[in-house]
């Protein structure tokens, strides 16, 4: 079953990186996911200041806002989609993720299968 691991950074350093882990931590985790044969897809997101938010009102009018206007202190840093047998295995991989350390969190969600 496919699961998405949404990586939420709770604290970022002056370079916009997760404060509680290093690039080497991420490289090791990425390697482990690939070597385990469970990697489906994944990406790290660009700096938050590149974000653009789009909202569409009920009348169809579109509002576009530039900049990092998050409603929370957490920042979506990236994601992995993994293919594992069950939720418990997905949770184990989420716990190994450097993004789950300290003030970070990894949200685990099943990927919907519409049978298409």
Image (cartoon, rainbow, N blue to C red):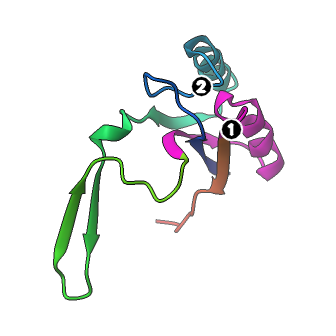
The image shows a total of numbered marks equal to 2
Q: Which mark is residue 94?
A: none
The image position of residue 113, as x and y in percent, is: 56, 63
Image coordinates for residue 71, horizontal then vertical, percent: 47, 59
Residue sitting nearer the eye, 26 or 9: 9
Choose between 65 and 100: the one closer to the eye. Answer: 65
Which residue is painted at 59% across and 20% down in the image? 26
Q: Residue furthest right?
A: 88
In the picture, measured across the screen, residue 9 lies left or right of residue 55, that is right
Q: Quadrant of residue 21?
A: top right
81 or 95, which is in the foreground? 95
Asked if disc 2 and disc 1 are in contact, CB closer than 8 Å, the reply is yes
Estimate how packed mark 2 is, as few (under 14), some (14 to 19) or many (20 or more) residues with alpha carbons within 10 Å.
some
On screen, residue 81 above or below 24: below
Judge whether residue 59 is colored magenta: no
**Residue under the point 60% across and 11% down:** 24
Residue lying furthest bottom: 59
* Residue under the image location 69 percent in, 31 percent down: 97
Give, as a single range, the part of the protein colored magenta. 75-104
- Residue drawn where x is 26% and y is 63% of the image: 54
Vertical order, 103 against 67 (above or below)? above
Q: Which residue is mark 1?
A: 103
At label 1, counting other C-alpha atoms closer than 10 Å, the crowd grade (few under 14, some 14-19, many 20 or more) is some
- The correct choice, above or below, for 104 with respect to 98 in the image is below
Regarding mark 2 in the picture, which secondary structure is present there?
loop
Numbered label attached to residue 19:
2
Q: Position of residue 89 (x, y in %)?
A: 80, 42
Q: Is residue 61 left or right of residue 12?
A: left
Task: Give the Cα separation between the discs numbered 2 and 1.
Answer: 9 Å
């Amino acid at each position: 079953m496919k699961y998405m691991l949404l990586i939420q950074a709770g604290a970022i350093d002056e370079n916009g990186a997760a404060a509680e882990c290093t690039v080497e931590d991420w490289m090791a985790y990425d390697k482990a996911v690939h070597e385990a044969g469970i990697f489906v897809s994944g990406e790290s997101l660009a700096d938050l200041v590149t974000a653009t938010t789009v909202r569409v009102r009920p009348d169809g009018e579109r509002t576009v806002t530039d900049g990092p206007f998050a409603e929370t202190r957490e920042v979506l840093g990236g994601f992995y989609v993994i293919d594992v047998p069950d939720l418990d295995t997905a949770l184990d991989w989420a716990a190994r993720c450097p993004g789950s350390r300290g003030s970070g969190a990894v949200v685990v969600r099943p990927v919907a299968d519409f049978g298409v």
